[in-house]
Structures are given as structure tokens and as C-alpha cells.
Image (cartoon, coloured by chain):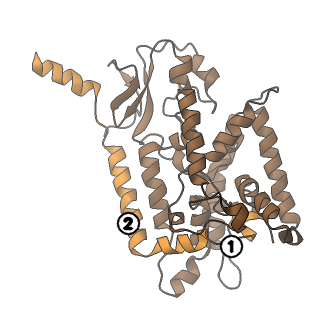
Amino acid sequence: MKNSSSNDKKQQFHLRKRPFVIVAFFLALLLVGVVTGEPPQVLSQAVQICLSCIGIG
Amino acid sequence: MEVIRKFVQTITAILYNGYWAFPVTKTIYQGPIKVICSPGLNCFSCPAATMACPIGSLQQMLAGVRSAFEVGQYHVGLYVIGSLGVLGGFFGRLICGWACPFGLLQELLHKIPSRKFDVPRPLRFCKYFILLFFVVLFPLFLVDEFGFGQTWFCKFICPAGTLEAGLPLLALRPSLTSAVGLLFFNKLIIMIVFIVWSVLSSRPFCRTTCPLGAFYAFFHRVRLVKLRLDTTRCTHCGACHHVCPMGVKFDESPDDAECITCLKCMHQACKYDAISLEAGGIPLGGTLAGGPLQTAPKENG
């Protein structure tokens, strides 16, 4: 009885692994970006008003 | 549930734009939090913005990739793409439905009483074109004599930038009006078109133009949190078609790339408990019943 119940649960809650693989892949990209020093560049660009970027000038 | 979603949308919009000292300082927020890319579309030149716009950041990275390589910095936007990919893997376009200020604005505009029109479905492909060309290829390859590209989407299209940054900055610094030219009026027209279109149609910018939504749409089959359809309970009554703000026919395509997981079909339409929310295969809400589930049919993992 217990085994069949757990089998039912397994069928009902089939864990999808692909989302975790995708997240791990992009997390690795993010970390490579961090290691190569991209965040300071993002910050330096984000704290400046880019007038041409918003259509002024 | 709709009240909760509106609450979450409002809170995230406030968090993205939490620098309220700008009327005094007359400048934008320049603190360290701005290194974080906001999950939703929110211009980082907005005086109140506390986070970086991922689309703007990615374009700036790609536009300056040659000069970065010349000084030995291999900056190709992996930090931004990685940030977006992690969010996309977890939530996909749920972010569009729950955590995008420009999405919230369009929803509020659509509440204005008027005759309503549907957005022609083929127009949804435009946003992928805009992502590929205006966000990636043009900034990367159309460069000036010094090797610098331009932020094509921000400069020529983004109505969020005009509304959140262009107009407020002109109000804060009237001296900038001398620099306003044809380009700004062109963007102003685009913004007005989307504002009027949002009154007449549901989320037209998200459905036709948003490159961030296009990026998150790539995760529609593999994202962790998604809706699923219980085919044994679905009667194909079509109730879910009428409430969907993105024009998705959920019973026909439960993994539709346009689905923003606003849960309207689950809570406001389906009377048969055929739609439920799940995370990685584990039910979170709606029906908890088993049975053949029509979600991610091509996925085995």
C-alpha cells in the first residue's frame, strides 16, 4: 500500500530537472561575468545620465 | 489574487524607483545598488531608479565591446545575460506579469473605459526582431570610426525611457530643452502611440515590442514556475481565452511563450479546476489532482 501510494505521488509530482540545469548554466555565466569585472562597468554606466540613450542630444 | 498581483506590481515598481530625493538633488541615484539589474523594464536614467536596466546595460556592454577588448577587458555582457537567464529559468515571463513597472502602467491605462481591440497575434514576432537587431546586432556591429556602437533600442524606440527618464529629466533640468531635437520628438510620438494603444488594447508593448519580454519568452517551456493544464478536467469552454491579457488560448497552448502567469485564467475563468500553478513539477496552487498533465509536452527532464 505504502509503495503504491509513493508511486502515485511520484507520478503526480514528477520533478522537472531542466529548469535547474538552465538556472545553473546562467548562474555560471553570471559568475564568469563577475570574475571578468563586468559589474563595476554596469554600475559606472548606470550611474551616469546617458542623454543620447533617452533621445536627448 | 488580482489584488495581490497589483500589490506586488506596485511594491516592485516602488523598489525599482525608490530614490525620492531626486527633486532636491536634481540628479539620478548613484549608489552601489545600481549594479543590480532590475528584473523588469525600468530605465536607469530615471531620476528615481535604484537599479540598472538590463536591456540598457546589455546594449552599452555590446556597444563598447571593441574598446573593452582593446584594453584587455573581456566584457561581453555575461553578467547581464546571466542575471536575466537565472530570473528567466526561475520565473520566465511571470516577471512581466508581476514585477514590471511598464507592464503595470499598461494595465492601469487599459482600465480607462473605451472600445477595446485585440492585438494582431503575428505582431508578437516583432519583439524577437527588436531583441536580435536593436539590442544585440546593431549595437555590436554598427559602430562609428572609434569603434563605439549605439544603444539602438534605448535611443530610437524605448517608450519607458522617454516616460521615466526623458520627460522627468527635462522637468528637472530645463536647460536640457535646448538639446531636444527630432530624435526626442520621434520617441515622444512612439510613447504617445503606446499610451493610446494601451488604453485600447491589453499590454501592446509587452506583446509586440519589449525585448526583455522576448528574452524571458525563450524560457516558456523550461522555466521552474509555470501554469499547467489538467486535460482530464478541461472542457475547452474557452473561458480562459476571454480573461487572458496576452491573448493566450491556454487550453490550446499551455506552454505559450506569451503567458505572463498572471493567474487570471486559474482564478477568474476556469470553473473546472483544470489550471494549476507548479514549480519544477510540484503543485503550488489550483487543483492538486493528478491525471495526465499537458505541460511542457516535449520535455522529459
Task: Please tell me which residue is depicted at 56% across the width and 43% down the height of the picture.
Answer: B11
Task: Please tell me which residue is depicted at 82% across the width and 25% down the height of the picture.
Answer: B115
Task: Please tell me which residue is depicted at 51% across the width and 63% down the height of the picture.
Answer: B33
Task: Please tell me which residue is depicted at 53% across the width and 31% down the height of the picture.
Answer: B4
- Can I make out residue B251 in this image? no
The colour chain A appears in is orange
The colour chain B appears in is brown
B140, B175: nearer the viewer? B175
Quarter location, residue B67: bottom right
Q: Residue flagged by tag 2: what amino acid is it? A: Leu
B98, B25: nearer the viewer? B25
Horizontal side, residue B51 vs residue A37: left or right: right
Tally the marks. Answer: 2
Quarter location, residue B143: bottom right
Image coordinates for residue B144, horizontal then vertical, percent: 71, 80
**Kind of element beneath mark 2:** helix
- Identify the subunit bearing mark 1: B
Q: Residue flagged by tag 1: what amino acid is it? A: Leu
User: Disc 2 marks which residue?
Assistant: A31
Image coordinates for residue B240, horizontal then vertical, percent: 57, 21
User: Disc 1 marks which residue?
Assistant: B142
Image coordinates for residue B107, horizontal then vertical, percent: 68, 35
Image coordinates for residue B214, horizontal then vertical, percent: 58, 48
